[in-house]
Amino acid sequence: MAEGLGKTYTSGGRPLRVLDSVDLEIARESVVAIVGPSGSGKTTLLGLLAGLDAPSSGRVVVDGQDLAGLTEDGRAEFRARRIGFVFQTFHLLPTMTALENVMVPLELQGSFQGARERATDLLDRVGLSDRTDHYPAQLSGGEQQRVALARAFSNRPSILFADEPTGNLDQATGAGIVEMLETLNREERTTLVLVTHDLSLAERADRVVALAGGLLSSDRPGRGGDPRGRVSEEAGEREPAGRAAGEVGA
Amino acid sequence: MIPPWVRGAFRLALREGRHSLRRVGPYMVSITLGVTALVAIQSFRADVARSVEREAEVLMGANVRLSADRPWSDTVIALRDSLEQAGSPGARVTSVASMVLAPSSNIVRLVQVRALDPGYPFYGTMRTTPEGVWGAHLEPGQALVDPAILPQLEVAIGDSIVVGSATLVIAGTVDGLPTDLGFQTAVGPRIHVSHEALEEARLLGFGSLARYELFFEVPSSTDRITLDARYDDALSEVEVGFTLAEQQARRLSRGIDFLGRFLALVGLGALLLGGVGVASAIHVYVQEKRSAVAVLRCLGASQRTTFLIYLLQAVGLGVLGSAAGVVAGMTLQRLLPVVLAGILPVPVTPEISLMSAATGLGIGVWVAFVFALLPLLRIRDVTPLQALRADVEPARTQPWLRGLVMLVLAGSVTALCVLEAPEPDIGLGFAAGLGVVIAALWLVARGLVGLTRRLIPRRGPYPVRQGISNLFRPRNQTVAVTLALGLGTFVIALLLEVEGSVRRDLTLSFGDGQPNLLLFDIQTDQVQGVRELLPEAARAGAEISPLVSARIAGINGESPDELRERERGPERPEGWALGREYRNSYRAELGGGEELIAGRWWDGTAGTEDDTAVDSGTLPGLSLEEGVAESLSVGLGDTLTWNVSGVEVPSVVTSLRRVDWERLEPNFFAILEPGSLDDAPQTAIMLARVPDEAARSAVQRDLVRAFPNVSALDVSRVQAAIESVLDLVRQALAFLGGFAALAGVVVLVGTMATSRHQRTQEGALLRTLGARRGQVRAVFLSEYVALGTIATLSGVLLAGAAAGILLPSVFDVLYVPSIGMLGLVWAGVTGLTVLVGLAGTRKLLDRPPLPVLREAGGEA
């Protein structure tokens, strides 16, 4: 999917290489975690994979589409149809209700038919059927992230990017979100790429990719890749995220 | 078929509309204000013009008017007879200024005495007190008067007044004369009498300034057109004016239209200021919306979609704001005839003008649109990456796109000015002036900011240093705020300065030491007697000028008719100068307001620009005013022959004078060498200074008894009349200026809000670092004081410069800056800035710093 991906920013007039020839192929419907210390290039990689930015070198191919061959507007169109996002800070539009937030990606495509039904269904699946008319400010952090999850899936993306999805939540709430993310991901048969600091979360992926100083430093299977450790509802019950995190911390 | 991305943008724009309405809506009030002024002025202008044309014959009181400065010739009298035989009755109206004495109160006033023939006016209804006495003035020994006369003479209906040699009883007052322009009575109240009474009063002596009018009722328009074709040119040859009622109405409505368009420019100014308000509000809105835009971009919205979402919102709000303005403007349109009833020429019935409403709406929306474009361009700069990380440098819009938008903005403003202005040239001038002012403000603001940076105190208290250095921090709004505030200040200060200087000049012309009593129509043998009526102290200073009526009989041997045949060009004298009746004088000395610019005065004094001495030989020398000499195409050495009551008097131009017409003293186009006109029929005018008001009244009283034909004008009353007109003008400007000032306040609030976001974070950071609330407040206070000072100082300096240019060139008034006034403007606007600024930061000081910082972190 990514070939020789590199990105150079200009900072104070001097070039700053934040990502250096990264090769990465992600299988359809797999779960990949990208980990690494601050400044290692995780977010940059995510941005490039999602077509939010153009690489300085190399190329990104998603679903057979070379993103380099698209204009800025073409990439936007591509995101609208194929890609979903979950952000660390939720990034709900504060001026719209939960339901309206979930409908946004559909409306951007001009597909209004069935948009409301699809959004209501997703909010129901994340357990917020009674909060559809609430504004973000009226929701807790966990609820906001659940709305964000519903929004991320509303356009039936083939690939979902999650940037520290639990970073702004306490452990218990974060664990709930992770379970919901995994469930929806499985049900919607989406490929999931998540960037995280949380090693226990990363370990639940099929594959863990580590970055250091803009270079790919390791690429190994996670516990999700092991059929026994396959992320599942049962797995969640068997090994609550809180304990898992505690183990990592210990 | 609308593409899906446009439909999506529409839906999202609508969905977010509630929020934008709350955030940006209040600033649209500035658009509403401008549109209100425009629609009200435009509709009202149309109402007045329409009413004037509809009431054309009532305004004239007839269908046709002949007018002249001389008694009717036999030709005109024959014309009247033939028209009357053809079924078109005529009526004479003769007006002359005269002193009127009220024996009961012993008060004397200069009034217009109007003698009317029966029948006039042919159209319209008179309102009188008591009711139905119109016509009483035609009875022997009776008069009707304007209501203003009663208090001025301290008389009542039934009292007698002395007009010249006649004594008349006041039979009633004329409260509403349909032919009046409302303010006419205020300028010169009138007494209505019969022609028999006028004759008895013996006011029409030699040289008296009377106006002769002859009105006809010609109901058929085809007859009128025939008359116009037959007589208009023929009568103008003998200097008789020929006017149809509809021509007069059209002229009047054109004049009103012209005036209305000038006022509309002030309205447009308010609207453009509103545009600045919209721009700054959108600027803030876009700043707040950056993260939302980044998220939308992540979710697949294209650049054009996000841009369109917010552009649609701006236009939508512009539509709402303008629609409100249209409604308010139409309401105002209905109120204006009531408020202005006193000064309107005809009763005005408001009619809904769809044209004005549509223009107002269109212009309002367009202004909201073009002014929103520039700040909205930043929407395009937001990259989706900004949703992921805070430190992404936003891409900069291509310079060509910004340039294009600015070009559209400048083009639109110019087009609007031309559209609204009375004439395209004035519109272009207005737009160019606006451009120059903005450019100059920008330069001055940059200069002041640079100066402040250099002069910033290095040792002062921390909050002051911090506050002032905030003016130069990266991405500061100093120049933007300065432009908006400075423009508002500039307009206010300029209006005040111009008005103040004009008033001061007026006081100077009428003030201490200036003559304040003008006596005219004095016959030669009365001069000595009139002088003796003055108080002892005033006699010596009384300035007497003889007046000799004359027409031009020839220039260098060519008759006026031959001269008119000449090719159009600098060689051909202008018609008005050739045909007019001159009131020439002769005297030995140059007047106080005169400067000899060419040739030599009788005593040998040399001209300042050209001292050629011309020998006039045996002919008398002639000194011409420079302007009239140019109009007559004559210069030093040319021979001008005057026709003085049938006698030809040749003279040679020996000098040219520059005359200060503003000065209240007898000024003349042509002054002849003393001795040359001694025997010509003449009258005299006398200018005297009688400081004491009671003494002035006494002189006028004695005068009307001893010399009934001599008129006196108390100049202080003229001053009062001019001031009352000035007051009217000021009220009209203040009314519209009020709109501009209100729009300016909205702009101020908007521009202050521009940097609130930044300030909130800065305040929180300062407090995290241990600053007390008082210290943070002191930082802001110093910043606002500095900002307000720079902005208003720019406006005030520029207003001073503009007044210095405008006053001498347009108003012919010397400009003396009134430091006190400018200081007040500075203090007022700066105070307002500080108040608005501090009001905006009050909330942030009440909040604990942590949530603010956290929000700031999460927002990017």
Image: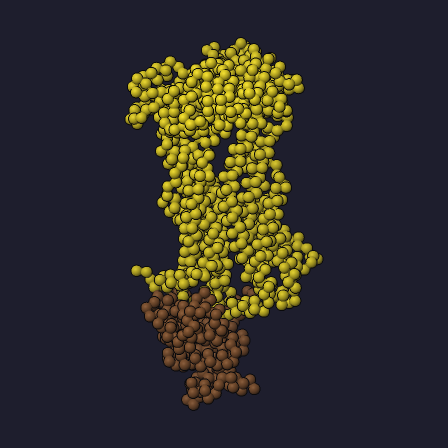
Chain colours: A brown, B yellow
Q: Is residue B734 above or below residue A193?
A: above
Which residue is drawn at the image coordinates 46% and 56% (left, top)? B25
Q: Say which quarter of the image contains residue B758.
A: bottom right
Which of B454 and B783 lies nearest the eye of the viewer? Answer: B783
Which residue is drawn at the image coordinates 54% and 22% (left, top)? B109
Looking at the picture, how far across and down is residue B57, in whole percent? 36, 28
Q: Is residue A201 above or below residue B461?
A: below
Q: Is residue B738 above or below residue B214?
A: below
Which of A163 and A212 lies nearest the eye of the viewer? Answer: A163
Looking at the picture, how far across and down is residue B708, in whole percent? 53, 15
Looking at the picture, how far across and down is residue B154, in whole percent? 54, 25
Q: Is residue B40 above or below residue B616?
A: below
Quadrant position of the N terminus of chain B in the picture? bottom left
Q: Does the rendering let one see residue B580?
A: no
Which residue is drawn at the image coordinates 57% and 20% (left, top)? B106
Q: Is residue A187 left or right of residue B648?
A: left
Q: Does the rendering let one see residue B576?
A: yes
Q: Say which quarter of the image contains residue A227.
A: bottom left
